[in-house]
Amino acid sequence: MTDPHRHRRNEDRGEKEVEPVEPIAPCVISLDGMYAEDWFEELGHSSPGFDQLCELIGEKFVAFSILTGVHVTSLTVDRQQPEASRVDFRIGESRDEHRLSLGEFRRRLAASLLSDEEFLTELSDPSDPGQLQAYIGYRYVLLAPVFGMHLHYLVFPAGGAEARLGMDVDSVDGDVSLSEFREMIRDQVRSELDDSSSGSSFAIDLDAIPPAERAAAEEDWDRVIDCLGAWPGPLSLLLRTSDGQSLSVDVRRLLAGALGLLGTAYARTARFDWAEEVMRLGIQWSQDDVVSGDLFQRLADANARSGRHGQAIGLFRRALSLGAPPAVVLPGLARCYAVRGKAVAAIVCAEEAFEAGVEDAELTSELSAWKATLGSSWDRFRQLVPAGAAPVGAVSNGAASDSVLGAASDSVPPDSVPPTCGT
């Protein structure tokens, strides 16, 4: 309650009445439009080879290199020891070339980002995006979206307290002091370096396999690579250790199957050399187990897609001998035979594929074209070798039936096979 005599007592003492002071409201500055949150993605769209560089070095480390002025000029990959891969690069405008191992390159980038940065201490024009970035910290502003942080506003509390940032992380809104925000970014940089270093150990997360299988079923090959792309190096090293050799058959099958998925993903994204390397590693893990047939079939398909149809034929036949399903193998084998000018063998494999339950309208059309091209030659072959005779079974069993099939198909000129075969 207000004292009615207070004013009079103040006058008696010669004091002036002091009116109550309203608290000063905090100043809030919107950060919308201060910077392009998708700067990293936009840069990737305009840079050839960007996705491949991110896959090899690490997406976050590519962002680190951009922010520190480092330009990667070449990368020599060591698939067995990824940390030993060689990175050639230039710094800033200098034309001098430098070379480091991938592991050391990442450590240097992280150290550069963790070094001290000078900040603007006062804002003369709060509407100037450049001043706002300098006040918060250029590298921190640009690293925020890389780590999934979205900055919304900057608050200057009354009384000169430290400025605070309104932001959201993983769709959770909140605000933190400027120094806390900077430390959050620094922690993320340290964590990224720790994760990249631990990635070279033998720790393999088998929980990554189900998401990779779902992605493969949806033909989302990039997501398969995201799930399993870090496995080949550690698994290549683990294979040569006693720990690797002592793993149970079930675990070895899981690892081999996962490498098969990864190899197929590389093949479907036209990285055929990587696909072959990964699937041959999977074959070593499988040790002629039941998974081997699937791996040989995948390897054969990768070779066929890269135009190496002769090698693919041998791999398809090996897959059949190891128990791969004929319905999976025979369509590809038929097309490879056709491309190689072995029309009779192509037709035999296609017919057996349909007997195995294959439903493929394109293969049906190709089969008709192959038969039409051979004309009476095919009729003579069927008189000598009726359907269901040995050569058909020999093909599906992977046996050496070339003496029969090869002799018949060699009499047909290679250019008699329609050019659409095997595509």
Image (cartoon, grey):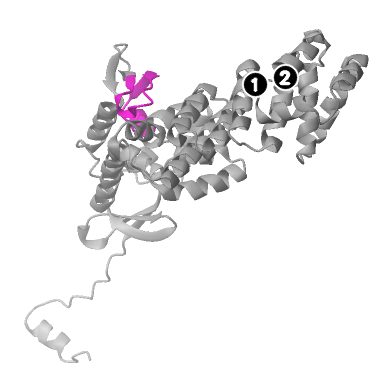
Q: Nearer the viewer, residue 245 or 393?
A: 393
Q: Label 1 crowding class (10 Å Cα cut-off): few <14, some 14-19, many 20+?
A: many
Q: In this rendering, would 310 be left or right of 213?
A: right
Q: In this rendering, would 284 be left or right of 96?
A: right
Range of residues picked out in magenta: 61-87
- Tell me: residue 416, above or below residue 220: above
- Distance from disc 2 to disc 1, alpha carbons, whole Å, reads 7 Å
Q: Nearer the viewer, residue 150 or 76?
A: 76
Q: Disc 2 residue type?
A: Tyr
Quadrant assignment for the C terminus:
top right
Element type at mark 2: helix
Element type at mark 1: helix
- Label at residue 59: none
- Tell me: residue 183, above or below residue 138: below
Instruction: For the residues labelled 2 and 1, say whether their Cβ atoms are less than 8 Å apart.
Output: yes
* Residue at x-position 24% and y-position 40%: 119
Expressed as whole percent of the image width and height from the top left, the position of residue 161 reads: 21, 58
Whether residue 225 is visible: yes
Expressed as whole percent of the image width and height from the top left, the position of residue 253 reads: 47, 42
Q: Disc 1 residue type?
A: Ile
Whether residue 37 is visible: no
Q: In this rendering, would 223 be left or right of 5?
A: right
Residue 84, magenta (yes or no): yes
- Label at residue 337: 2
Q: Label 2 crowding class (10 Å Cα cut-off): few <14, some 14-19, many 20+?
A: many
- Label at residue 313: 1
